[in-house]
Amino acid sequence: MTGFWENVYVETAASYSVAVLCLILFMTIFEIVTKYNNWNEVKNGNLAVAMATGGKIFGIANIFRYSIEHNDSLLESMGWGFFGFILLLLGYFIFEFLTPSFKIDDEISNDNRAVGFISLVISVGLSYVIGANIK
């Protein structure tokens, strides 16, 4: 049975499954944290929300990319992925803190594409910084 778990196809399927499940969980947490409903806003054509949400999805997936690459076990990958998500979430709160003249969620829900784009870049950029430190 050990050979089964060492098969590259089985490892890939397992990593993929865990990453997708974690992505769903983490996006649910982001949904709770933001004041707007991501998927309703995307459905209604809000490009700022789409960019911010896309950045979060890319950021989480990128963190898992590094986590899977640098860890031998699925459990270690999940642990680093969770830790990376916490740091990404912290980055979201720091962004809000550093812009006291306006509320990030309000601007994004109002389709302020400049704020949505900056949110996307912050998520993507931080995911590379986080990923570079995963061991």
Image (spheres, grey):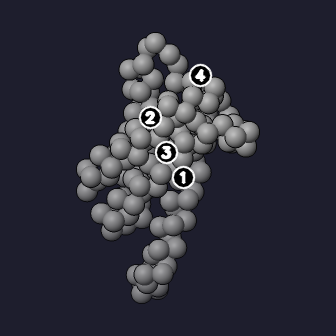
CA separation in Å, label 4 and label 3: 18 Å
The residue under label 2 is 118
Above or below, comparing residue 108 to residue 82 in the picture: above
Residue 114: image location, x then y, percent: 50, 31
The location of residue 72, given as percent across then percent down, is: 33, 68
Q: Earlier in the sequence, mark 3 or mark 2?
A: 3
Mark number for residue 55? 3
Q: Whole-percent x and y of residue 35?
A: 62, 26
> Which residue is labeled 1 in the image?
23
Q: Is residue 44 visible?
A: yes
Residue at left offset 44%, top offset 34%: 118
The reply, left or right, for residue 78 in relation to residue 27 is: left
Query: Residue 70 occupies which quadrant of the picture?
Result: bottom left
Which of labels 2 and 4 is toward the front? 2
Judging from the image, what secondary structure is the residue with disc 3 in?
helix
Inter-mark Cα distance, 2 to 1: 21 Å
Q: Can residue 76 be seen in this snapshot?
A: no
Circle nearer the N terminus (3, 1): 1
Q: What amino acid type is highlighted by mark number 3?
A: Gly
| 132 over 99 or under it: above or below | below
Instruction: Evaluate if marks 1 and 4 touch, with contact meaning CB atoms under 8 Å apart.
Output: no
In the image, what residue type sits under mark 1? Leu
Task: Report the front residue among 108 and 34.
Answer: 108
Distance (Cα) linking label 3 and label 1:
12 Å
Specify which label sits upstream in the sequence, 2 or 4.
Answer: 4
Q: Which of the two discs, 3 and 1, sits closer to the camera? A: 3
